[in-house]
Image: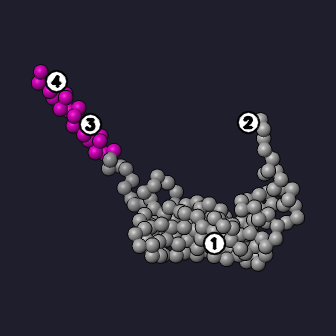
């Protein structure tokens, strides 16, 4: 009986040691507090309000990431950047913004013929905190859009393909 108690006690001690060493081996370092907001800026060449095969991406467009207080709506910070030759922007943002509402916002287009913002595509929300299950520090924003002053000639044909209805449903 004494040896059974000793064996159970030894097993309990070994389990406790294994559990404490497992928790001690976890990486308890804080996650990065610098984020990168990534997105693209496109030109709506057909004035459709959405991306089409004729849409192009704009190099040199200016984009801003703005964060506002959830309670007061006052702007708390702002970070700016420009798109590269593929129309992609990568804007570094410092610190956690868990209690703020942050958005990517179009500022300006270098293409004067495609400089009016597309309604509903001028801003996109981004979540800038580590408490959301995303392992990476890169946060992806929906594409932002400007529209041409006049649509391309080929757009009538392109937009027709969106009008076709499939009756086989």
Provide the secondary structure element on which disc 3 rests: helix
Q: Position of residue 139 (x, y in %)?
A: 55, 61
* Disc on the earlier residue, 3 or 1: 3
Is residue 98 toward the left or the right of residue 160 in the image? left
Whole-Å distance between the Cαs marked 1 and 4? 73 Å
First to last magenta residue range: 1-22
Label at residue 169? 2
Q: Which residue is mark 4?
A: 4
Give the percent coordinates (x, y) of residue 35.
51, 65
Q: CA distance from mark 4 to mark 3?
A: 16 Å
Mark 3 neighbour density, 10 Å: few (under 14) some (14–19) many (20 or more): few
Q: CA distance from mark 3 to mark 1?
A: 57 Å
Q: Relative to 163, is 58 above or below?
A: below
Task: Using a 10 Å C-alpha cutoff, classify the residue at mark 4 as few (fewer than 14 neighbours), some (14 to 19) or many (20 or more).
Answer: few
Q: Are marks 1 and 4 in contact (CB under 8 Å)?
A: no
Element assignment for label 1: strand
Mark carried by residue 15: 3
* Disc 2 packing (10 Å; few <14; some 14–19; many ≥20): few
Of the image marks 4 and 2, the number of the one nearer the N terminus: 4
Q: Give the image location of residue 40, x and y in percent.
A: 67, 64
Residue of label 1? 106
């Amino acid at each position: 009986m004494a040896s059974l108690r000793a064996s159970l006690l030894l097993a309990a001690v070994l389990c406790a040691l294994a559990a404490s060493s497992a928790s001690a081996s976890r990486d308890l370092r804080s996650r990065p507090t610098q984020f990168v907001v990534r997105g693209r800026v496109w030109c709506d060449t057909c004035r459709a309000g959405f991306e089409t095969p004729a849409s192009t991406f704009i190099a040199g467009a200016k984009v801003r990431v703005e964060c506002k207080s959830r309670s007061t709506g006052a702007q708390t910070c702002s970070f700016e950047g420009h798109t590269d030759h593929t129309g992609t922007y990568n804007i570094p943002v410092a610190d956690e913004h868990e209690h703020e509402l942050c958005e990517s916002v179009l500022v300006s287009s270098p293409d004067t013929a495609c400089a009016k913002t597309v309604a509903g595509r001028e801003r996109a929300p981004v979540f800038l905190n580590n408490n959301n299950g995303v392992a990476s520090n890169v946060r992806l924003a929906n594409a932002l859009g400007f529209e041409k002053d006049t649509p391309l000639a080929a757009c009538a044909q392109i937009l027709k393909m969106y009008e076709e209805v499939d009756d086989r449903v």
